Image (tube, coloured by chain):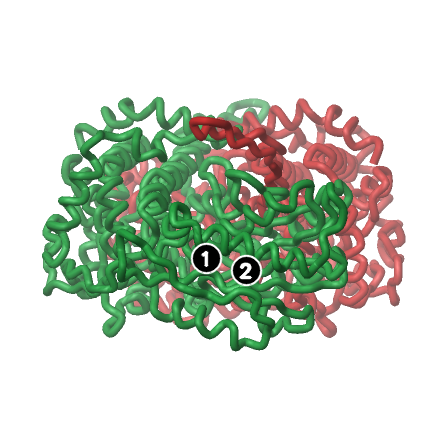
Chain colours: A green, B red
Amino acid sequence: MNTSNTLFEKHRATLDAALHALTVRNYYSPYPENPRAYAEDADAMAKNWISACMNNNYTSLDQTEANGWIGEEVSPFLQVGIGVKYPAFTPETLLKNGIVAQAAWSKTSTEQRTGILIEALDRIKSRFFDIAYATMHTTGQSYMMSFQASGPHANDRALEAVVMGYKELTSVPEKAEWIKNLGKFDLKMNKTWKAIPKGISLVIGCSTFPVWNTVPGLFASLITGNATIVKPHPKAILAIAIVVEELQKVMVENGLPKQVVQLGVDTLENPITKVLAENPMVKMVDFTGGSEFGNYIESLPKTTFTEKAGVNSIILDSAKDLKAVLGNIAFSTSLYSGQMCTAPQNIFVSKHGVQTEEGIVAYEDVVKGIAAAITGLVDNPKAGPGTLGAIQAEATFARVQEAKNLGGNLILDSKSIVNEEFKDARIATPVVIELEKNQSDIFNRECFGPVVFVIKTDGLADSLALAEALVKEKGALTCGAYTTDETTKAMIAETMNNAFVPVSFNFTGAGFINSHAAFSDFHLTGGNPAGNASFANSEFVSKRFVWVGNREM
Amino acid sequence: MNTSNTLFEKHRATLDAALHALTVRNYYSPYPENPRAYAEDADAMAKNWISACMNNNYTSLDQTEANGWIGEEVSPFLQVGIGVKYPAFTPETLLKNGIVAQAAWSKTSTEQRTGILIEALDRIKSRFFDIAYATMHTTGQSYMMSFQASGPHANDRALEAVVMGYKELTSVPEKAEWIKNLGKFDLKMNKTWKAIPKGISLVIGCSTFPVWNTVPGLFASLITGNATIVKPHPKAILAIAIVVEELQKVMVENGLPKQVVQLGVDTLENPITKVLAENPMVKMVDFTGGSEFGNYIESLPKTTFTEKAGVNSIILDSAKDLKAVLGNIAFSTSLYSGQMCTAPQNIFVSKHGVQTEEGIVAYEDVVKGIAAAITGLVDNPKAGPGTLGAIQAEATFARVQEAKNLGGNLILDSKSIVNEEFKDARIATPVVIELEKNQSDIFNRECFGPVVFVIKTDGLADSLALAEALVKEKGALTCGAYTTDETTKAMIAETMNNAFVPVSFNFTGAGFINSHAAFSDFHLTGGNPAGNASFANSEFVSKRFVWVGNREM
């Protein structure tokens, strides 16, 4: 571990800048999001890398006591298996190796871990293009989103967790001389405090954001001294495998066991998640995915951090420029084919229409306008394919096709469009369905994928009440609202905030409610049914260790 | 609420000093623990107050919609009922009034709440002597302990919670202008953040420390904007009633509803605790008491903070001055008749004896020495009565009498001693019982009260293994250890700390493992079975609110 303190010094400036950003919460990122900011040949090399990777064993990961090779990922762009196989381990092996690694990792200092983890993020940065292609061919995200979401934006969130951890871990001194004057004499004690890691951490990934949703929990557990098992979704392993590979390399360089971070791969047929999650050696579980499994995870008698399903609403009350608003909504619903946890699903519009600078736009015209804006976006060959990407799962594709039969009024049907680069891509444009306010059995649940419901309400108060009832019951990650009236704005903010949902007001142009920026926006509040975690409030790290103080006379 | 910002300025110096103390964790208290530091007539006035109070209705508390008067407290010193009756409310009334008060309290700013709560602590300070007598005649604590534990030490812990709350609530800015350069233009957003209180808080008190164990949760919930219902133990109401009274007065002075803090009294026959705790309007529960009820509280689908039973050990390996050690142990086990959650119960001693500067003291002599030290303390008329106080509950008294029949070897029987001031006091000196290491069915559970087990082990490693197994199974609030060997010390620290138990080494003289000082020692770690809370780590406040951020373009 001789280089670790050097690593802390090496990355001190990044740490300090990130600490400052967390305090002021303005824009900050040490990892450029524009691919052009990187080496010119980086993309070409990554293309070669993924070609060589496909249909081969992924041999650069730890294979100690592995018992075979497994992998069943399918590219949504090619609709064929990518053929990558990963070392397979029994849960018992993962736990046994984790316990040994935990003993070593828990003995490192906060400074050592901080240096090692920021160094690892630098190594991961050198793999951003590999990670981009790996993400594309497992999730169906477009090239640009794959690069940004799994690369710089994920690294931002990982760094945020490291820095929040550093902040919490250094909030109590290592020692103090405690002196209490008792009149005739002083009572003196030497005191020391240690943050004791809770133990093995399990991070369960999802199929759509295998890196972005995994690294916050992974790095939060690591900075607080806990050896971590990453259990990726069986259909989205390759991108996070690169992250684990780079972490393992940096561990070994610093004299630590590779198994501080392990990749526990499984298959749909032989899942290992519950066996791991229920084992008493696993002290904390991070989970991203469906609500049913998420509720099961939360019911386990251990520390849990969940991001489950939510239903995101847009409340459309009034707008300066309705065209800009509809364009923004069209992009938000189409981006990655609505497969983002932050994608809006329900658009609440008053039957009396929407007030604009040019007067009231009738309800029917607003509904048509939403459909037209989506059509304009997806039919534009320069914008459509790159915005939509591909549909990750067959089940999502089927759900979109079935949506028109749910009972609403079909405004715009889903269709496929041509992606010139990937002719076989699984593509579905958003389906737009109009619903009456009493059809809450349809709109009060998540229809994951490109499904948009426009709900006709009796006015703003009604829209707000419906949105509020929905988030209280099902939760949400975000809420969009458009209003030019300050009183209305305050009312929407208070109502939704009191239900622990953040609101994004009047987003147009390059701002989209789907995006949550590290160091500024909390991702999830942890206070509504969409999940109990928040990336990254202080609890997101402090629940992973325990302060223990010793005293000596 | 016009005076609240003035109150913040008034108490700013205290806030700053307390914030600093939390950072460096040296000794700090703004509330003197020596009764002589207060007005000369304060004690006499308090004696008059308690005399007037007894056998009367407690009319200075909120009585809105009360439906009668109840109270069944018994003085352990007098062994007669004190006859104080408190306004009785149905759970529905408490919750309904709480919801109204919550709406007002949650709208106050962090600064307003900080000012109001530190002001309330000043008013409570002016009642320390009343609180002392109220504590004596409900818990059986001696006068000095009643004064210190329910007065200055409780106020310290309350202030600690307020200040930790202030720190967490100000860790995120109220607003920021977020500007991201996108090359050709800047993406700009105005962002705001709010800490949204979770809702009504329920704080369930215990019979032995009705103020000290109640105010941390009470003030933590209040500083984070949550209206709070205090549900005291039916046998220990009066002291915390004074605290609630002073809080209600300060609320009203600041234009806020009294019901921001309510006292929900019940009786053993008609308890209201579960009805309140299970109501969905109650969002968080603080609890101090037995493990069975504490486990039930933890199982509720809400935020919980528990302090349950633990079993505290002393590991006696080696000592410079064994006499000083035995005297310290005798005091720790006798103080308030072992009715402190931090009192040691199990003393692990090697069969090979204890190494001292004068050579090895044989195991049998150590056992005898413990008994002799306790006898010396309790038989000293100047020290005994004031150290022991009285036994709070009949059940505890009975348990002590029965201890000799548990199966161990009786070394020192419990007895009564004379308290000149209170001839009818319920008094029991510690019983000392010797056990073999295989009698863990006897020593591996809490025998609340003055019961001391000396366990004969095969040596240090054995003592440590037994203590470790015990804390992993049953938890502990503290562990005392005596050793002159640095390697042994490190081994004990690592073993117990990894089981999330703090260790106090080589305490003699005026330092006792029973005492945890605010602003320095965490009370409970929250990581072992003795409870999930820690007074006051950042989680102790941050779990009571949710960060929500809005964005606007």
Mark 2 falls within which chain?
A: A
The numbered mark, 1 or 2, whose residue comes first in the sequence reads: 1
- The residue that disc 1 covers is A338
Q: Cα distance, mark 1 to mark 2?
A: 8 Å
Label ID, residue A179: none
Determine whether label 1 and label 2 are within 8 Å by CB.
yes
Q: Secondary structure at mark 2?
A: strand
- Position of residue A83 measured from the top left corner of the image (x, y, whole percent): 15, 61
Tell me the amino acid under the disc marked 2.
Answer: Gln
Say which quarter of the image contains residue A290. bottom left
Q: Residue at x 36, y 29 (%)?
A: A30
Q: Secondary structure at mark 1?
A: helix
Q: Nearer the viewer, residue B550 or A49?
A: A49
Query: In the picture shown, does residue A522 fall above or below B112?
Result: below
- Position of residue A116 measured from the top left corner of the image (x, y, whole percent): 25, 34
Q: Report the side of B221 relative to B67 (left or right).
A: left
- Position of residue B324 measured from the top left corner of the image (x, y, whole percent): 41, 37
